[in-house]
Every structure is written in C-alpha cells, then in structure tokens.
C-alpha cells in the first residue's frame, strides 16, 4: 500500500510540473511596464501594457499615461497609433523601431548576445573574460557619429551591464540589467536602469520595471488581435473641425 501511494504522489508531482511548464510556454507574451524618467529633478512616469505575438512578430502597446493610445508595430517597422478617445489613427514607418528590434523581443527570443547592436551596424571588436564576467566590445558603424564603442558585460550568459563610449572614451550612457527571472522559455531582467550623460554635465535616469508577465499558447487577450476601427479618422482631423 505504501509503495502504491508513493507512486501516486510521484505521478501527481510530475503532472503538476508538466502543467506548470505548459503554462509558461507559448508564443503570446504579455506584461506590464512601468517607466520613470528623472530629468532636471522632475519625474515623468509611463505605464504600458505590452503584448507580443511571436508568431506574427507584432508588438501592441497600450499607453495609459497622459492621453491613452494604442501602438501596433510589425517586423517591418510599420507603426500605427490609435487614439480611442477621438477615434483617430496615424501611420509611419521606421525600420529601426521594428518589433524585432524591441528589447522585449530580444530577451523573449533569447537573442541577448548583442541586444540589437548587430542590427544597428555595430561589429564585434574584441571579447575577453574578466573574473566571472564575459566582456565584449562592439565598434560603432562609421555613419554613427559621436559613438566609438559599446561595452557589454555578461554574467552566467546574461547581459548585466552596457556602456556607450564617445570618441574620447567618454561614457555617454550606462545601462544595468537586474533582477532576472526565469520563465522557462527565456529569462528577463525585471528591472532596467539607464543613465544618459548630457554634454552639460547633467544626466537623465530612466528606470523601467516589468511585472505581471504572462505566457500563453493562445491569443487569450483582445490586444493580441487588436484591429483599428475601419472608421478611424486621420490623427489631428478633430482639431481642424
């Protein structure tokens, strides 16, 4: 009897583990993003609900700060901004803002070796180990003025720090990736702190915190299939009436 009960508990344990793993697998990823920007002793906060459809490579963002609007971006950098309050929409295309060049896309698809530097034209210049850290240096493309090198630091295979260096080895920007959490398919830093240094000597601090990450094998939220109404007007048209 004891042996039978033991087998039952083991079977139940495996079943629970399988359900837990299945719950964390899928191509539909949603999360909440809270960003605070501190500049000139003033703080600006932004709250975003983000939805990534890895099948279609589409990212939908619902901005809740200021005037609510919904941004839909595809892998070609085609951007649609929809404003529900006025039923208006605007369109633009910026290849650098493609869904495949979004930080969340890089992390959730385990493309963390350069976090977009290669896509921006940077080339790997050198790499070495410094104690427990793996450090890479990336050379900026010639068309990018003012930046010479980007340094990336990895720990246990994950990026934990990066810095942009100007032509005279002056640090222009530092980024810290912290509080990593394992989601089976990928690992995501739940907090990112970015410090940009201005020529005046001041700095801008950008602090982003992610929460409520959900992964599903089905599009279980309306924003994964968000469609802008056919009767939406061009943005700004309401002001002209």
Image (cartoon, grey):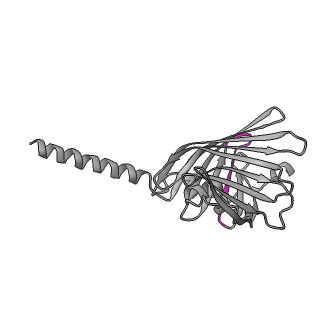
Where residue 65 sits in the image (x, y, percent)? 71, 40
- Front one among 40 and 112: 112
Residue at 38% over, 48% down: 20
- Front one among 218 and 196: 196
- For this orientation, the residue located farthest to the top is 41
Relative side of 89 to 167, left or right: left
Residue at 44% over, 55% down: 25
In this picture, is 108 found above or below 177?
below
What are the residue bounds of the magenta stretch? Answer: 64-75
- Front one among 48 and 14: 14
Where residue 149 sits in the image (x, y, percent)? 77, 59
- For this orientation, the residue located farthest to the front is 131
In this picture, is 137 found above or below 190?
below
Relative side of 159 to 22, left or right: right
For the image, the number of numbered tags is: 0
In this picture, is 94 found above or below 40?
below
Residue at 69% over, 63% down: 126
Q: Is residue 73 visible?
A: no
Residue 73 occupies which quadrant of the picture? bottom right
Residue 68 sits inside the magenta stretch: yes
Where residue 125 sits in the image (x, y, percent)? 72, 65
Residue at 64% over, 51% down: 61
Query: On the rendered image, what quadrant is the N terminus found in?
Result: top left
Residue 5 occupies which quadrant of the picture? top left
Q: Is residue 1 visible?
A: yes
Residue 184 sits inside the magenta stretch: no
- For this orientation, the residue located farthest to the left is 1
Where residue 127 sits in the image (x, y, percent)? 66, 61
- Front one among 163 and 70: 163
């Amino acid at each position: 009897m004891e042996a039978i009960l033991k087998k039952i508990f083991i079977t139940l344990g495996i079943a629970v583990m399988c359900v837990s793993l299945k719950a964390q697998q899928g191509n539909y990823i949603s999360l909440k993003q809270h960003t605070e920007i501190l500049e000139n002793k003033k703080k600006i906060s932004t709250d975003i609900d983000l939805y990534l459809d890895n099948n279609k490579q589409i990212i939908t963002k619902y901005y809740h700060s200021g005037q609510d609007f919904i941004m839909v971006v595809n892998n070609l950098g085609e951007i649609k901004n929809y404003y529900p309050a006025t039923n208006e929409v605007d369109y633009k295309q910026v290849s650098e803002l493609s869904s495949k060049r979004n930080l969340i896309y890089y992390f959730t698809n385990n493309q963390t070796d350069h976090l977009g530097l290669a896509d921006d034209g940077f080339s790997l210049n050198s790499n070495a180990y410094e104690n427990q850290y793996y450090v890479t240096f990336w050379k900026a493309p010639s068309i990018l003025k003012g930046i010479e090198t980007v340094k990336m630091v990895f720990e246990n295979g994950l990026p934990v720090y990066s810095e942009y260096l100007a032509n005279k080895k002056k640090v222009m920007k530092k980024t810290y990736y912290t509080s990593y959490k394992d989601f089976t398919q990928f690992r995501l830093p739940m907090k990112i702190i970015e410090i940009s240094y201005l020529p005046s000597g001041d700095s801008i601090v950008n602090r982003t915190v992610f929460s409520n990450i959900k992964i599903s094998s089905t599009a279980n939220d309306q924003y994964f299939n968000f469609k802008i109404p056919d009767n939406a007007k061009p943005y700004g048209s309401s002001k002209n009436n």
